[in-house]
Amino acid sequence: MTAIARTQGSYTRRHGELVFGGSPWGLARLSAPARPFARKVLRRGAGAVEPVDDVERATARLLVDRGLALPVHPPRRPRPDEVEVIVPVHGSAVPLTRLLPAVHGHRVTVVDDASSATDAREIERVCAAHGVRLVVLPENVGPGGARNAGLAASTDSAEGPADFVAFLDADTVPTEYWLDVLFPHVDDPTVAVAAPRVRGSVTGAGPGTVLERFESRRGGLDLGPQARRVAPGGQIGYVPTAALLVRRAALPDPPFEPGLRVGEDVDLIWRLVAAGHTVRYVPSAEVHHEVRAGLAGWCQRHTAYGTSAVPLEDRHPGRLAPATWGWPGLAVLAGSLVAVGGRGPVRALGVAGAVGGSAVQLGASVRRFHRRGLPVSGGAEVAVLGLRSEVTAVGNALRREWWPLGALALAVSMVCAAPVSRARRVARAVVVLALAPTVPDTVQAARHWVQDRLSHDGPAHDAGAALDPARHLALRLVADAAYGTGVLRAAVRSRRWAVLRPRLRQSGA
């Protein structure tokens, strides 16, 4: 195996005996021979580490399979016949004039998803000018259906199908070496998908619009700068098909569900993972996408993402629950709110509930570790991390699926009345709970903004000038609420409430 590097958040305890992290997050106990190499890889700031013998190679494979580390490959350009690029398009041909030169030299199939007659003629002209195959659909089937049609056309082509397919939306522009970075990852036969980072484009020579500057740093399709193994329940649960490299042989039939016009990428990734394939997110490869002009259109896009929750819940039951609690975590949350709002005996009761829930969570986790012969300190750490995860999920839901509750709490907390009422104290606690998960991202935005202000070189064109933390946070809250509005709308229209209900685990640990 090639050199590997730790993924952020992965670490060891007890001299390498226990390893924490991965995707989805978990805990593993290593045998004594494997521990030195694991410590070397998972040490903070270690960089890439290459295994040198059979034990280290086996340990490296374990770390990679659990998402605790990922391979570090030198770039390698695929041959023109190894990758087919499939581009669905509907409407204006202008984005194609930017995209097609960037994929020159590859086999390209453009699928016109029943554009208007005027747009269709222009799309045909642009495709002919660049010498790419054009498939014209008689009726609109959505981006997933258009990709299916492109796959079928490339399979039936005279030169035969390429082993790998690169999906690119028409409004994207890949950087020059994006495929060179992704392609070595699919040398591993277990890897079905390698995905780049998708960042908003900054147009023109200036710092960019406010939306462009936000999307270039934290867009709706941008999954961040950290490489990850992709899995439901992990730090990265899916990757968008706006830009994706896929092993053709791994694709199910049909690759994209015909009934899904939004969320088809989530469904595909989850089906591939369920079938035992590996999906990797490789942010060192970058693709830029066009940012929607205007706040209204931008919000509508995020709302559309939210409407996919109900059909995805139908296909993957339980995965779209806004939060998952154990009984102890629920006791901690409820007890904390009662303690904040109560006085005297009521406050004491709330404190007792929160402390009791924490004790139950801690005790159950420690007992489980003890029964398995594992260090009880690891059980305590898992209990604390589990409670933190449950509280964070509630905070996220209060900005997204439950945003009306979060907005109500904000309104109540700002009511000017003296003395401060119990309702206001509880409302303020709810607002803090909702905003707490945004703190790391806001701090990062502030750091970028300060660095740009102090820099004398000016902003990089592809990222634009950093947005100040206040507007960054405001746009994040708007995006979260827009997504939640889509979920609420879909749930009300279909009368399916699973996407709004928290899920309760029966296990207390």
Image: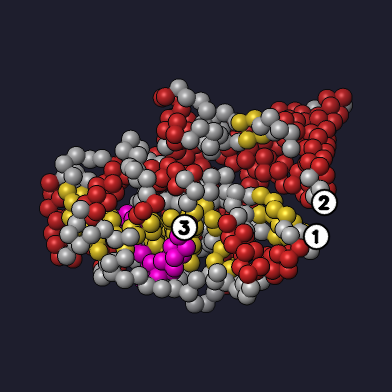
Which one is nearer the viewer's eye here, 195 or 117?
195
In the orientation shown, which residue stands out farthest toward the front?
54
- Indicate the secondary structure of the residue bearing disc 1: loop
Sequence-first tag of 3 and 1: 1
Tell me, yes or no, whether the highlighted magenta stretch contains residue 170: yes
Q: Examine the rendering and report whether any part of residue 161 can be seen.
A: yes
Using the numbered discs, state the Cα–Cα distance from disc 2 to disc 1 in whole angstroms: 9 Å
Residue 167 higher or lower than 35, as above or below = above
Q: Is residue 356 left or right of residue 212?
A: right
- Disc 3 crowd, CA 10 A, few/some/many (<14, 14-19, 20+): some
In the image, what residue occupies the spot 74% across and 33% down? 508
Q: Which residue is mark 3?
A: 191
- Disc 2 crowd, CA 10 A, few/some/many (<14, 14-19, 20+): some
Q: Position of residue 108 (x, y in %)?
A: 24, 61
Amino acid residing under circle 2: Pro
Q: Examine the rendering and report whether any part of residue 261 can be seen.
A: no
In the orientation shown, which residue stands out farthest toward the top?
495
Amino acid residing under circle 1: Arg
Tell me which corner region of the image, top left, top right, bottom left or bottom right, holds residue 365.
top right
Tell me which corner region of the image, top left, top right, bottom left or bottom right, holds residue 95.
bottom left
Residue 401 higher or lower than 291, as above or below = above
Q: Which residue is mark 1?
A: 14
What span is colored magenta in the figure? 166-191
Q: Position of residue 443 (x, y in %)?
A: 62, 58
Tell me, yes or no, whether the highlighted magenta stretch contains residue 83: no
Residue contact between numbered discs 2 and 1, judged by CB atoms under 8 Å:
yes
Task: Report the quarter where the C terminus lies.
Answer: top right
Sequence-first tag of 2 and 3: 3
Q: Which mark is residue 375?
A: 2
Residue 234 higher or lower than 68, as above or below = above
Amino acid residing under circle 3: Val
